[in-house]
Amino acid sequence: MKIAAIIAEYNPFHSGHKFHIEETKKIADAVIVIMSGSFVQRGECAIYSKFARAKAATLSGADLVLELPFLYSTASSRDFAYGAVKILNALNVVDCLSFGSESGDIEFLKKLASYEETIEFKSILKTLIAGGMPYPRAKMITLENCRLPFTEDPNDLLATDYIGAINSLGSKIAPVCIKRTVAHDSSTEADGFLSASAIRNKIREESDVSYYLPHSFSEKPLFYESLSPLIAYSVMNLSKEDYPVRGKADSDLIATIKNTPFGKDINSYLYNIKSKRYTMSRVKRTLLHILLNSGEKIPEFSPYARVLSLNTTGAEILKRIKKESDIKIITKPDSSYEKENISFALDVKATDVRNMVLSKESGEDYLVSPFVLK
């Protein structure tokens, strides 16, 4: 059985994601998805719970859905990619990694990734980042300065991070790309598809999005603004001694967060912090780490994979993984996992914080079993 993997957020799961799974199954017998949990890489809440999004993916053809730990799902694009690829590689069953791409040219993406391993590239990139330039912009400027072809598409740039992670791990996983039908963050429909950001905006406006979703969500959607009181409180209680260790952010950003008046709402507060040096996503991610009280004791790698949903094929794959994996496989967690692994404790806390805002019961990670499609 040839097994492909997909790294995703599914925020929410829509028809474009279903298309990606279907296209991937043309080159593989089965698909494993590793998906962000309660929060996503932009530093925002997942609009629906990880359990509901995983179920929608399995109903649309994903054979096994695993959770990408909070530690990686709310990290920079490099760490997001590296953490996901390292977990997939440790399963010892994945043959290829399938990702969406604006260019759809895997050889071009491989070349870009190889350029990024050169001494010249690393030197220029390091200098630009040290000077305060955000990583995505620094990456494009570095490619220009090296007189190399480059792309401004976020999905292509993320793809090179995936390929770079595969290369740095010495993994045998083969990268493959599926050409995207809709540009990243596009607000325009194309061939019946709409971007996740445009769908979220429509949900916020209470517009009907059923046409774009293969499976409906019965949950109440959650938006970042709902975290406002919790974030304000956590920032007010942030001490100077905490500055260097929260969320891997540098002390200047933490000091700016602490010293910026909160104002009338969370959005004005965010825009007062955002700058050429600090992207909005980075600011939001850092605030999340302050909220969840993550710190310097977080391990470099989280050696586990949490199962969220599966079908009968996924059950067979899971049996194989349990025999061959280098990391712990969690299907029904208990409280001992929190004591054993700080990263897993953060996953549980992230779910509880999300549910607190929604006035839902805490401990959902221990109450909900993986969805099984038979």
Image (tube, rainbow, N blue to C red):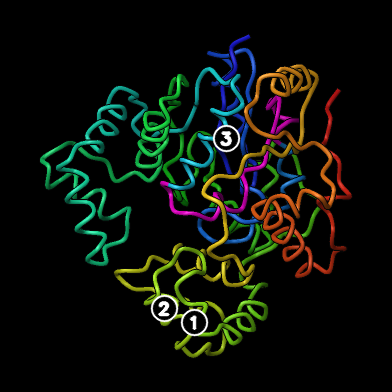
Which residues lie in the magenta part? 57-78
Q: Name the quadrant of the C terminus.
A: top right
Mark 1 and mark 2 residues within 8 Å of each other at the beta carbon: yes
Residue placed furthest toward the top: 1
- Residue positioned 45% across, 72% down in the render: 244
Gap between marks 1 and 3 measured at Cα:
36 Å
Q: Is 61 contained in the magenta span?
A: yes
Q: Is 63 contained in the magenta span?
A: yes
Choose between 41 and 120: the one closer to the eye: 120
In terms of image quadrants, where is residue 276? bottom left
Observer-side mark, 3 or 2, equals 3
Does residue 210 lie above or below 292 as drawn? above
Q: Which residue is mark 2?
A: 273
Q: Which residue is mark 3?
A: 87
Question: Which badge, 1 or 3, comes first in the chain's sequence?
Answer: 3
Q: Name the quadrant of the N terminus.
A: top right
Badge 3 amino acid = Ile
In terms of image quadrants, where is residue 137? bottom left
